[in-house]
Image: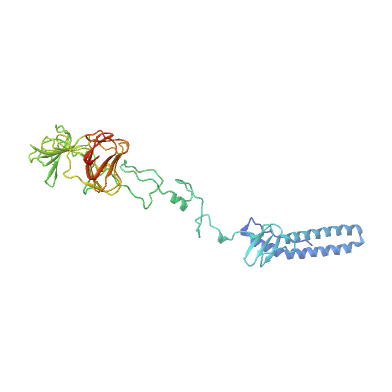
Amino acid sequence: MPITALPTPPSRTDAANFNARAEAFLGALPTFATEANALATTVNTSATNAATSATSSATQATNAAASATSAAASYDAFDDRYLGSKAANPTLDNDGAALLTGTLHWNSTAAEMRVWTGSAWVAAYVPAGSYAPLASPAFTGVPTAPTAAADTNTTQLATTAFVLAQGSATAPVINGTAAVGTSVRFARADHVHPSDSSRAPIASPQFTGSVGIGIAPATPLDVAGRGRFLQDSAATTGAIILRQNAGDTVGAYIQWVNNANSGEKGWITVNTAGDMIFGPASTERLRITAAGIIQDASALELGYKDIPQNAKTAAYTLALTDRGKHISITTGGIIIPANASVAFPIGATIVIHNDSAAAQSISITTDTLRQAGTSNVGTRTLDVYGLATLIKVKATTWVISGAGLS
C-alpha cells in the first residue's frame, strides 16, 4: 500500500504561506500515520504468509521493518519540531524531552506561530499590521532615526535634533554688501538684528566724525530760519556757520556772524591739543585746557572765588580732588602721599585748618616737605586752630607756611 506524500512543509522564510502550509501539513499527518500503520500491517501479514519461504519471507520482513522504522522516525522527528496548537508556551516537547532550537507551535491564545530560540519563545513572523510599508508609511508613537551632521544637504531624513542644529549662531552682518547668501543655516525666531550704526535716524539724528553737507551749496541748510550751516567759508546769510580752513589760524570752528555774513561776532574751537578756545572776532578770550584748567588770554589759570571745604574727623591722606580746597580736620593729622603714588601737578595748592584744641601733625611719606622761610623739612605740627597752606613746587617737593606752624 503506498503512503500518500506529505504536502510542502511550512517555512519561516515564507511568512505569508506559513499558516496555510502548516495547517495542510498537520492535516496530512493523520492520513500519513494511518497509511504507515497499514503498511506495517501489510508487511506483517506478508511476513506470516511468507513463513513457508524463508528467503522470501526474510527479505520482505526486513524491507517492511525498515519502512516502518523510517516512517516512525520521520513522524517522531516532525513531532519534535512542530508541537501543534498550544494554549500556552510549552516547556517540553510532545515526548516530554527538552525543546529543540527551532521548534514551532501555534499559540492559540496569542493567535500566532511561535519558535523556540533556545532560551525563549518568540513570534515566528511579524503580523501584516505590525510593520510599515515602503511606500508612504504612517508611523505612530515616537519614531526615531539617525541624526545627520549639521549642514548635511542630501535626501537623508532630518530629525528634530538636526533641525535645531541648523539654527545659526552667527550675528547678521551690518553695513555689508547686499548678497543672496549661500549658507544652509537659518535664523532663529528670537534672533535680534543689531542697530545699523552707519545711518542716522530721521528723528533727532546724532552725527559723529566729520559731517559735511556739500562745498558751497547753492542753498544752505536752514534750521527753522534760525541758523545756516556750511562746511567751507562761502559767504551766505546766516547766524551760525561751521567752517573748515576758513583762513583763520584756529582752523575748524563754529562761528557766529551777522545776518549778512560780513562780520564775525564770535567763535568756539577745539585745537589739536584738545583745548577748547572761546573768543570774539579773532581774539582769544578764554581757554579750557584738555586737563580741565581754565585760563585767560594770557594763559593764566583762573582761581576760585571761594575755597571749597573737605571736612575730616580722622587721619586723612590727601587726594588729587583736594586741589584748590581747604581740609578742615579735627583729629588724626594729615598725610601727603608720595609723588610716585599720587602725582599732584606742580602748583597744586591745599589749605589745612586744624579745627581742634589739640595740635595735629602734617607728614609726608617719601618726598620732601619744607617749611617756608626755614631750613626745616619733614613732618610739621599745626597748633590748635592753626591754618597752613601747602604748595607743590617740584615733582617731589612741597612748601608749607601758615599761622601756628612749627
Left or right: 126, with 364 as reference point: right
Residue 199 percent across, percent down from the top left: 25, 44
Question: Relative to residue 2, is residue 154 depicted above or below?
Answer: above
Residue 64 percent across, percent down from the top left: 83, 60
Question: Relative to residue 38, is residue 280 depicted above or below?
Answer: above
Residue drawn at (65%, 57%) of the image:
12
Which quadrant holds residue 114? bottom right
Residue 59 in view in this figure: yes
Residue 280 percent across, percent down from the top left: 11, 38
Color style of the picture: rainbow
Figure quadrant of the N terminus? bottom right
Left or right: 289, with 336 as reference point: left
Residue drawn at (46%, 52%) of the image:
161
Which quadrant holds residue 175? top left
Residue 254 in view in this figure: no
Comparing 75 with 382, the one in front is 382
Comparing 43 with 369, the one in front is 369
